[in-house]
Amino acid sequence: MSSKKQQNAFQGKECFSRMNFLFQASMLMAGSNKTLAAYYGELCKNIGKKAVLKIDPDVKRQLCKRCSLALQPGITADLETVSQGKRRKCSKNTQNVDENTSLKLTCQQCGFKRKYLVNSEYKFWLENKESVMETITVEQEKQKIIRSKESKTLET
Amino acid sequence: MPSRIFIHSTSFFHILNLKVNFTMDNSMAPLQELLTDMVVPTHRSEIKINPEHITMLQGTKSKKQLSRKRAANKSSTLTRREYARLGLHTLPTRQMLYEEALPLHKLWKGYMREHLGLREGDTVPAVHEPTYDAFSRLLVKTDLHGAKIRVVESKCPTLVGLSGIVVLDTKNMLKILGKDNRIRSIPKSECVFGMRLWNMEFTIFGKHLALRPAERSVKKIKNFIEPFELE
Ligand SMILES: [Zn+2]
């Protein structure tokens, strides 16, 4: 009974593991074969769309929004810092990082650019502790333990 | 002569045989002059021209409009033509090496262990066991990228015996990278595939795999998948 309940609690487990696998495969292929990397990335996104599952922003940002290529800075993408604001633009000390600076990630394949703020005060909702509803541990070992416990209870 | 002129453009300009080549902003002044000249001098003070009622026959779109459109096109989505131009549809038959796909196969093994909840040495539930149904349902939903696969049976005799690592999985095709570093396309629906995982051997009918890869993990499989087909 308890195992059934657990399975129900974690809906879309298969889809999540599949997406996870595809994302890793995309990252793996990013250097050698861009066609496959883009295909896997797109498939990962599409499964998320079909099954209505949300991808964590940190993961989502590692896939190009336009061509779904896995973006690895230095291999398939360029990473640079851009400081916003007209005064800062001309200043010499560009290495300074403050709340106006943003990261610019450029996809080498399709040239799509995205800017991300580097502001330590700004946080995702997901980074807040309040956003965590419940944690589910999915480990083979734990399931085994539960199974063995069940069998024991059945025996007694 | 009317004191107020509302022009509904086309007819007016056709009568006068005017060709207007100015852009919107510049053209208004000479037009106003022309219209005021036509009115009887005593009534000229009462002229009101509504600029919205004037449409120009010639002249290009203003630059602002064009630039906006271009900017909108450039963002986010790729059209299929752009996608093809980037070379994302092409997968040459002799470009990848078999060794390149090995890490993918290794990754796939780990994924299968997690997905099926199996460990090395486990056995697959037999047909009469109650878990068989759920297991086979799970097996059909697996991702095949990275699997080592062999064609066991096929309507086309030349396909039988081909083996390799699955590289691309589309609705009706599997692209397999063989040990001779060649990518081969194999239609799913006519074949029966064999798949090895540690000590287990799976046999999958390609007929059940012929779905879009993104849909496959979502779609509910209603029919019980029989181990043997009844002819
Ligand atoms: Zn891109």
Image (cartoon, rainbow, N blue to C red):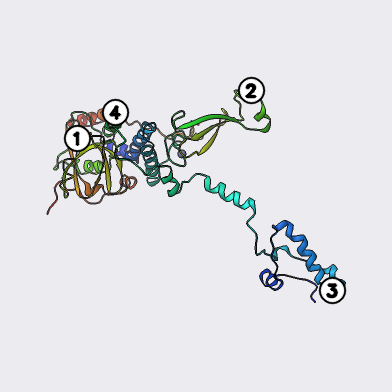
Q: Amino acid at mark 4?
A: Lys
Element on which disc 4 rests: helix
Q: Chain of mark 1?
A: B
| Distance CA(mark 4)–CA(mark 2) | 53 Å
Query: Relative to residue B127, is residue B40 depicted above or below?
Result: below
Which circle marks residue B196 in the picture? 1
Same-subunit check for callouts 1 and 2: no
- Quadrant location, the C terminus of chain A: top left
Q: Which residue is labeled 3 in the image?
A: B40
| Distance CA(mark 4)–CA(mark 3) | 97 Å
Element on which disc 1 rests: strand
Most extreme residue toward the right is B42
Query: Relative to residue B59, is residue A7 depicted above or below?
Result: above
The reply to whether discs 1 and 3 touch (Cβ–Cβ < 8 Å) is no
Q: Chain of mark 4?
A: A
Residue B11, how many percent across, how many down? 67, 72
Mark toward the viewer: 4 or 2: 2
Q: Which residue is labeled 4 in the image?
A: A142
| Distance CA(mark 1)–CA(mark 3) | 97 Å
Mark toward the viewer: 1 or 3: 3
